Image (cartoon, rainbow, N blue to C red):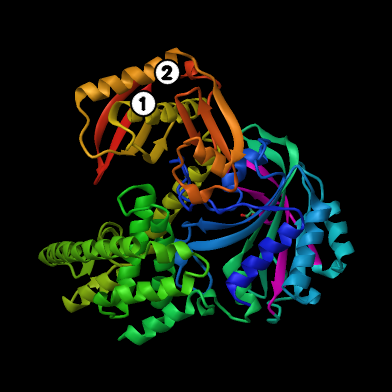
Amino acid sequence: MKAIEIRNKYLNFFKNHGHSIIPSAPVIPENDPSVLFTTAGMQPLVPYLLGQKHPSGTRLTDFQKCVRTNDIDEVGDNRHLTYFEMLGNWSLGDYFKDESIAMSYEFLTKELGIPAEKLSVTCFAGDEDCGKDEVAYEAWKRAGIPDERIYFFGKDDNWWIAGEEGPCGPDTEMFYDTGKPKCSEECNPSCGCGKYVEIWNNVFMEFYKDKNGYSKLKQQNVDTGLGLERMTMLLQGKETPFEIELFAPVMDKLVELQKVDNIQSRRIVAEHLRSSMMIINDGGRPSNVDRGYILRRLLRRMTRHLNKLEIDLSKLPEVIDTSIEALKELYPELEQNKETIKTVIIEEKNKFVKTLQNGEREFEKVANKTKNSGKKVLDTEAVFNLYETYGFPPEMTEELAKEQGLEVDMSDYKKLFKEHQEKSRLGSEQKFKGGLASTGEMETKYHTATHLLNAALKVILGEHVHQKGSNITHERMRFDFSHGAKMTDEEKQKVEELVNSYIAQDIPVERLEMKKDEALALGAEAMFLDKYGDIVIVYKIGDISIELCGGPHVESTGKLGHFKIKKEEASSSGVRRIKAILE
Ligand code: SER
């Protein structure tokens, strides 16, 4: 079965069980600078898991484009991916454990045809925060899983939360038995030896965790996630995702182009290319901070490994074409945006080739310094610095050193590398956590201020103004919009005054649900049209502003305080950027 068939079967199955199919959110979360990427299907649904009413109802299903970059350096092995697609179904205070488990079992065995004896499941063993999950256990027994294939584990295995704070709960996980021999007497789904592969996770989200501990949510939710690439690989009897139709043509193309054989490098190129394309397609661009930096790292690592395979870099467009061809059935948007995607990747590749040259110069400096001081060994810090700053893999530094009769000291490299990894991991966890908790009072005010600013810019500069991006922290807002020229001081002052007059009028902010077409007919602003389902949420501020938006917003504009523009500058060609604060 191909990935597209699995996806379609999944969405149809849940549709037939009363779920509304909602579109995937972009991999770059909209209006939320505190989260790097969308990492799970539940992430865009957090407000609804917490009790807000979803316009598409209480049973939802979708495929979600996800990026997880904590293990970026592991990619190249036989399983890690930075981009993956998660199929999911949700109950927002609708069905709970029994129905969720019955549906999962039916889907796996009947729709996908997985023999029941290949399935093992795990449930929550219970602790002081939450009891043993007897309900899930009984549901699995009823479905037909015998006792010996039902396991119980504690929070480490059978509890799901994104980061440190947020909606959470016990989960039940489904595992596929690959038929490999047991690794030991105790071999079980949590041992990680590879005999059992996790295929689906159903989280029974009825708690909220914050620094004070656990509390019950308003409603009992179900949040499930099934990794599409992994399921496709298992159903096709393949050992790695790189052998399925989404990657195989690229892997073959690389074999055709390579002068040196290296399967890890081929996997890294194929994987990082796909991930980068998905990020670029949703508006990401390489830079030195946050998301942009991750994209840069992906593209640079890809380029380094193209070099390692000794592939002529002028062939990169062919590799991109092959990858898009393999993915376009799942993501037709890649084909539509092919030219932009290619341009961004190739420009970044060209920049990196220059950086590599700078790195070589830095290497020469370090090598000369080492030689001049009478040493024969490059110290670990220098090797690490070349990796971190110039993207030089240690093997490359070692190779260059050898050519100069030098050795490299790698004794502490692992330690430095681990520290570095730990730092970036902490960074991303922090980001994720921040994202979920980021609907604080100030952020909410800035959300509303963004709509007012958008409206005021249209009045003062003209109807050509549209939102091109937005970034909010609790301290300030940043707003990108289409406009061809630098704003004059007078224009800035007028915009500021107009926004402040909207605030002074204390206009109510209304949340409306309506058909997408209706909203567009009313002239609602919408930045990512594809993102929304047929029924949309619209925020209307008197006659001043109407925008498709997930919120949250303040009840009336009077809550905002005083609006002040701090800066107006170019963002990119034809796009200006305003930084502003509320005082
Ligand atoms: N949120 C859970 C996960 O990411 C289930 O979708 O595994």
168 within the magenta span: yes
Camera-side residue of 260 and 375: 260
- Which residue in the protein does label 1 denote? 456
Residue 8 inside the magenta-drawn segment: no
Whether the residues at callouts 1 and 2 have beta carbons within 8 Å, the answer is: yes
Residue 395's quadrant in the figure? bottom left
Taking the image as shown, residue 137 lies to the left or right of residue 60, namely right
User: Residue 6, how many percent across, how many down?
Assistant: 64, 70
Relative to 42, say whether 482 is above or below.
above
Residue 502: assigned label: 2
Q: Picture coordinates of residue 226 (x, y %)? A: 64, 62
Q: Residues within 10 Å of mark 1 (few under 14, many from 20)?
A: many
What amino acid type should be assigned to the residue bearing mark 2?
Tyr
The location of residue 92, given as percent across then percent down, is 72, 44
Residues in magenta, as a range: 150-178
Side of 55 relative to 346 (left or right): right
Respond yes or no on whether mark 1 lies under 8 Å from ligand 1: no
Instruction: Check disc 2 and report its element: helix, strand or loop.
Output: helix
Badge 2: few (under 14), some or many (20 or more) residues near its Cα, within 10 Å?
Answer: many
- What's the residue at 53%, 67% (across, down)? 330
Q: Amino acid at mark 1?
A: Ala
Residue 362's spot in the image, x, y percent? 17, 61
Q: For residue 562, say whether it is visible.
A: no
